[in-house]
Image: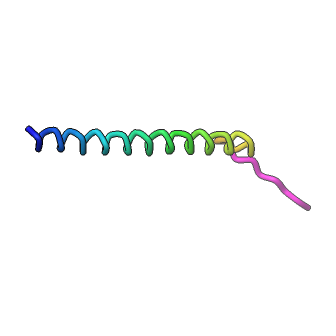
Amino acid sequence: MALERHNGDLIAAKRNRRQTESERLAGTLLDLHGIRRAYGSSRDCHWQSYS
């Protein structure tokens, strides 16, 4: 029983670390989307010509 409890604690700790990492990555993804919007990245190509 003690071993099962210990394994459950280990799994819970891993789950918490993964949840924290997932939230951090989600925040990073939002930041990247914001940067993309700020710099006007779009799917259309815009050519500029300097003559």
Q: Main secondary structure of the magenta part?
A: loop
Residue at 44% from the left image edge and 42% from the top image edge: 20
Residue 46: x, y in percent? 75, 47
In the displayed structure, does residue 45 sit left or right of residue 50? left
User: Magenta part of the protein: which range?
Assistant: 44-51
The outermost residue toward the bottom is 51
* Image quarter hosting the N terminus: top left
Residue at 24% from the left image edge and 41% from the top image edge: 9
Where is residue 29, by image quadrant? Answer: top right
Colouring used for the render: rainbow
Residue 26: x, y in percent? 51, 39
Judge by depth and name the residue closer to the eye, 10 or 30. 10
Residue 2: x, y in percent? 11, 41
Residue 4: x, y in percent? 12, 40
The outermost residue toward the left is 1
Residue at 20% from the left image edge and 39% from the top image edge: 8
Judge by depth and name the residue closer to the eye, 34 or 25. 25
Where is residue 43, by image quadrant? Answer: top right
In the displayed structure, does residue 4 sit left or right of residue 32? left
Residue at 82% from the left image edge and 53% from the top image edge: 48
Judge by depth and name the residue closer to the eye, 34 or 49. 34
